[in-house]
Amino acid sequence: VDFDADKYFMTQLAGGWARERQVMTKPLTDGLTVFKSSRGASSHQFNPFMAISVGSNATETRGKVYGFSLVYSGNFQAMAEVTESRRMRVNIGINAEAFRWLLLKDEEFHSPEVVMAFSHEGMGAMSREYHRLYRNRLMPPEWRNRGAPVLLNTWEATYFNVNHEVILEIARCCAKADIELLCLDDGWFGSRNNEYSSLGDWQPSTEKFPFGLAATVREVKKTGLDFGIWVEPEMVSYESMLYKQHPDWCLHVPERGRTMGRNQLVLDFSRSEVRDYIYDVLYELLGSAEISYCKWDFNRHLTEVFFTKLASGAARRNCSSFRAWCL
């Protein structure tokens, strides 16, 4: 999108853990201004959104502002370039780094959508326009007009020290406080007593839940609460049964070291056997009890994005590894 004005200001949403979406505004001068993610995900470091104020820096209630929201969770790049004549061009889309896609005759490629909005009444009116649009057109119909339940998550209360008795004690306290849903966070599966083990072994610990997860869920439901559970299925721990059985299933470059992040590795979702395994264990888990909420985490980004197993044909020609993992 091209602009022709004397002054431009760009607003983006940057940040980090526990300080997500910090509003950052800067004047645009001659040259190229870029922010992007090459992490394999859009990330809370850089959100795939920017707003351009034209003429003057827009406030919440005044000024012309144009919004650009990329509906995509993978690598992206946003840029604004001001020329010597004060004209400016804005681009936002898939990050060109490590991306290529060869189209043959009669083939198609669908790029992620960019939703654009305009307001002459400042940032607030633009934000509300996005809120209305995404609520009414992007959210699934079942959830559009449904209020979120009051939820308590076990992590800060127990960390990895969860078990049948602890969960029921928390549930009874929640019921007295009119909390509506209890989410069982990390520590419920495999031998997960710390951050070093068991990601990938998505079977409930028989030591912590000797009566089975379904029995714990039934007891929680008796207190009047719904039940949720935490998973991080993209990841695998070095100390896990899954890694011991399939060390080649994580992202890695053959004959090179493997980079740990948060003491975990990332599974290679380009491999059908990996996707099938995760689908099967999640299907079994979520169907084993009356679980109404899933907290799906993603605690580290991608490194060593090298696919050791690619199919023939289009998948081999279009070997954009980050894009394939995201899909």
Image (cartoon, rainbow, N blue to C red):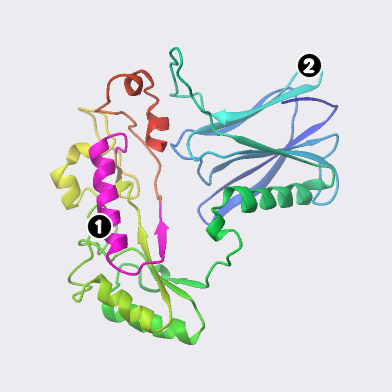
Q: Which-is-in-front pick, marks 1 and 2?
A: 1
Image quarter (top left, top right, bottom left or bottom right) of the C terminus: top left
Kindly indicate the quadrant of the structure image that contains residue 99: top left
Q: Position of residue 174 (x, y in %)?
A: 45, 81
The image quadrant that residue 195 belongs to is bottom left
At a point 53% along the width and 57% down the height, the residue shown is: 18
Labels 1 and 2 touching (C-beta < 8 A): no
Q: Residue shown at 56%/40% (left/top)? A: 71
The answer to whether residue 203 is left or right of residue 233 is: left
Report how many numbered discs are placed on residues in the image: 2
Q: Going by the picture, which residue comes out furthest to the bottom?
A: 176
Of 319 and 54, the residue lying toward us:
319
Whichever of callouts 1 and 2 sits on the residue coming sooner in the sequence is: 2
Identify residue for label 2.
84
Secondary element type, mark 2: loop
Answer whether residue 236 is visible to the viewer in this image. no
Q: Amino acid at mark 2?
A: Glu
Residue 198, horizontal then vertical, whole percent: 23, 56
Report the disc number at residue 169: none
Asked whether 281 falls inside the magenta stretch, the response is yes
**Residue shown at the point (31%, 34%) measured from the top left:** 270
Spot occupied by residue 78 in the image (x, y as percentages of width and height):
61, 31
Residue type, mark 1 in image: Trp
Label 1 sits on residue:
202
Question: What segment is highlighted magenta in the picture?
Answer: 268-297
Q: Nearer the viewer, residue 271 or 300?
A: 271
| Residue 231 visible in the shown view | yes
Disc 1 residue crowd, few under 14, some 14–19, many 20+, Cα 10 Å: some
Question: How far from the left and from the top, in percent, is residue 246?
Answer: 17, 42
On-image quarter of the N terminus: top right
